[in-house]
Image (cartoon, rainbow, N blue to C red):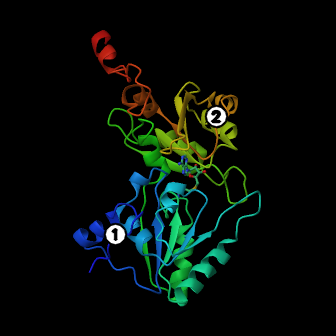
Amino acid sequence: MASPVRPGSCIGLPVIASARLDLPEFRPGSVWLVGAGPGDPGLLTALALHALEQADAVVHDALVDRRILALVRSGASLDFAGKRGGKPSPRQPDISDRLIRLARAGKRVLRLKGGDPFTFGRGGEEALALAAAGVPFRIVPGITAGIGGLAYAGIPLTHRDTNSAVTLVTGHNSDGTVPDGLDWQAIARGSPVIVLYMAMKHLAAISARLIAAGRLPDEPAAIVSKATTTEQRVLVSTLAEIAGAAAAAQIEAPTIVAIGEVVRLRQALDWLGDGQALDPDPLRRETRRKTG
Ligand code: SAH
């Protein structure tokens, strides 16, 4: 039977969801690796809400929005597993051990991650550790910043007139360097749209590599900072100038970077914007048709 709605809980949504959607039971002694989406609590999945309402122990990352953490069941333990105040982040094996210990103590363990747990989120590593330890787990995908964040900036990930492929790239190796193991030439040539995570530190170097590999310096590029949160900012520039423009505008992390013609569509699709007149033909298709 569904539990009664607690005062102050998220208007009983999980109760309704679990009752109507026949969502799976969150079993004691198991771990759910859940994506919290990029920020806006409205982008949580029904399964994520269900887990927040039922978990006994929540272990979360820095990128999980405060409004989402406020949905954690009262009485559940809330444990932070990220960087804070310049202190180094806990080692990945320590986080996995913590999840295993909590599960073996019979808790319903919610491992809450920003965006999607399997997209640059180390969810795979944690799930492998759980599998090796014989701890039952479930993966709850979330909306990744590279998709949801762009959508909140009015930039589609794919669009028939511009790209039938897209590449998600991390701009940062685990040791903090530019990922040189990547074939930037192949990415530049093969992917009309490139979406960069964790790229601010090396954005100038990455842009230079892409231009050296043949991408046009004046190709449109956009940065979405704190995407889908109340502090979202969007900066549109060109591939050659985006790094300098971001520094000048003091763009703050976290940021997602989109490179490619899809960025132009924002001129028509900035649905969150400030009400400025939108451009109905951002790709100049009508103009080209008339003049061509
Ligand atoms: N698993 C996450 C990504 C974690 S890596 C996901 O699927 O979204 C962390 C990087 O994600 C950040 O450096 C940034 O590039 C991006 N990111 C996460 N949340 C973001 C947000 N709200 N706005 C912009 N970028 C974000």
Q: Residue drawn 33% across and 64% down? A: 12
Q: Are marks 1 and 2 in contact (CB under 8 Å)?
A: no
- Residue 65 in view, yes or no: no
Residue behind mark 2: 212
**Vertical side of 257 occupied by 1: above or below:** below
Residue behind mark 1: 5
Does residue 275 appear left or right of residue 103 in this picture? left
Q: Residue furthest left?
A: 20
Q: Earlier in the sequence, mark 1 or mark 2?
A: 1
Q: Which quadrant of the rendered structure holds the N terminus?
A: bottom left
Task: Give the amino acid type for the residue marked by disc 1 in the picture.
Answer: Val
Q: Residue drawn 65% across and 55% down? A: 181
Q: Nearer the viewer, mark 1 or mark 2?
A: 1
Q: Residue furthest right?
A: 87
Picture quarter containing residue 143? Answer: bottom left
Q: Secondary structure at mark 1?
A: loop
